[in-house]
Image: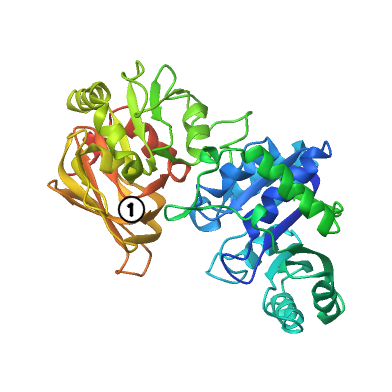
Amino acid sequence: MGTMTLTASCPALFITAPSSNSGKTTVVAAMARYWSNQGKRVRVFKTGPDFIDPIFHELASGEPAYQLDLGMMGEAICKQHLYLAAQQADLILIEGVMGMYDGANNSANLAATFGVPLLAVIPASSMAQTFGAIAYGLAHYQDNVNLFGVIANYVGSPSHAQMLRDSLPAGIEFCGALPRDNGIALPERHLGLVQAQEIEGIDQWLDYAASVLGDSCQLSLPAAIFFEASNSSLFNEQSNVFGIRPLQGQTIAVAQDCAFSFIYRDNICLLQKLGAQIRYFSPINDHRLPIADSLYLPGGYPELHLSALAANQPMLSAIKQHIESGKPTLAECGGMLYLLQQLTTKTGQKAELVGAIAGHGVMQTKLQGLGMLSATLGGHQITGHCFHYSTANISLAVIATAAQAGKTHMQEKVYFHKNTLASYVHWYLPSTPELTCDLFLGRLAMKIDQ
């Protein structure tokens, strides 16, 4: 007798585009706020290892937003996320990354894997009938694609919108036209968009964007689709990856403020599922560490808050003492830079930081690392992602190299010092719960051949 597959149904849309900078994030955030304002519960996902956009989506929807990435997370975890969201929500929105067909784990393939129809946002400020050709190409480049509609962005006038509508071939719905409006443009930030939590009046912006979207586009809920439960135990409250809670009784202090905010929600979910208690603190504003067994310093923008970080001497001393005492620490990207002796900005500003790791970091004008990577640590393979504009000269032995499969040009060094694991990689901890336990229980040193 076969086992029954659990399913949950919910309307869902996968928002994509021909390229980056087409307006996907604005449309998704506005759509999430629009339907939330209508009393609907909206769950939003972002494809790829993105930290910035999910915060916009959380503020827009009032619900937690998670990443969806087949390469980093695997299909089982992605399926379980969608299944659980379908149980809770009235609408699921998934924001794609880059262009619709860009990369091996692209939006078209991800949407096809989970049977979610696509809605393409096409910038149309300098085109007419070519709009229809782009829409046709997006719909027919692969046979497994279900592109049901498009939204025209940056439209100049109602007559322009009508011209775009008339250019569409049969079978592709024209779902609306967003006007050129600086009031709904997301502000630029250091290396991209401003972090949502730093925008004054973010709620007013979201409400305005939702209003413009509602007035300009034909918004109706799509038909519900079915999502299947997976065999992933990560988010299943009835099971556990170990059957026990190996981090029970452990407290992990997690840095969280405008300098350190790049952390996967799944990482926190895993640590809590393994039994750990999470205590957040601010390296900028707090003057002491929470009482904790271990420390997690995620990535972020320490270079933008260099003076404030350097001026908080009690925090610098507390973190250095934590590391010197051999307590477990995980430092990723900006968190690693914070532990160095010195950090220099692009303008030449220098500051002394924690000094627990011998070395110094220097911000650069060009991208220094980008890609999905994996490494073998303590007998386990762990995956993650890097994106950084700095270089680091570190006087420690390299214990492993995180690399892309089959590629040698994208590699990141991994360091281990006094129970501190440090690298440029933002690790996806659910890729190896066993290694996560070894690290935060202080057992990793025994398993690393130094």
User: In which quarter of the view is residue 169 placed?
Assistant: bottom right
Read off the residue under disc 1.
375
How packed mark 1 is, by other alpha carbons closer than 10 Å (few <14, some 14-19, many 20 or more), is many
- Is residue 450 visible to the viewer in this orientation of the structure? no
Q: Quadrant of the N terminus?
A: top right
Residue found 63% across the figure and 72% down from its top:
18
Which amino acid lies under the numbered mark 1 shown in the image of this protein? Ala
In the image shown, does 214 or 440 lie closer to the viewer? Answer: 214
Q: Is residue 42 above or below residue 346?
A: above
Q: Is residue 211 visible?
A: yes
Residue drawn where x is 61% and y is 42% of the image: 65
| Figure quadrant of the C terminus | top left
Foreground residue among 442 and 118: 118
Q: Compare residues 40 and 226 and report the one nearer the observer.
A: 40
Residue 417 relative to residue 16: left or right:
left
In x, y percent, where is residue 230? 65, 46
Which percent across, then down, holds residue 130?
72, 84
The image quadrant that residue 106 belongs to is bottom right
Residue 169 falls left or right of residue 16: right
The image shows residue 291, relative to residue 52, as above or below, that is above
Is label 1 in a helix, a strand or a loop?
Answer: strand
Q: Please report the residue visible at 55 percent of the width from the left and 42 percent of the height from the top.
A: 196
Viewer-closest of 316 and 409: 316
Image x and y of residue 292, in percent:
35, 19
Horizontal and vertical percent for residue 178? 75, 62
- Residue 278 quadrant: top left
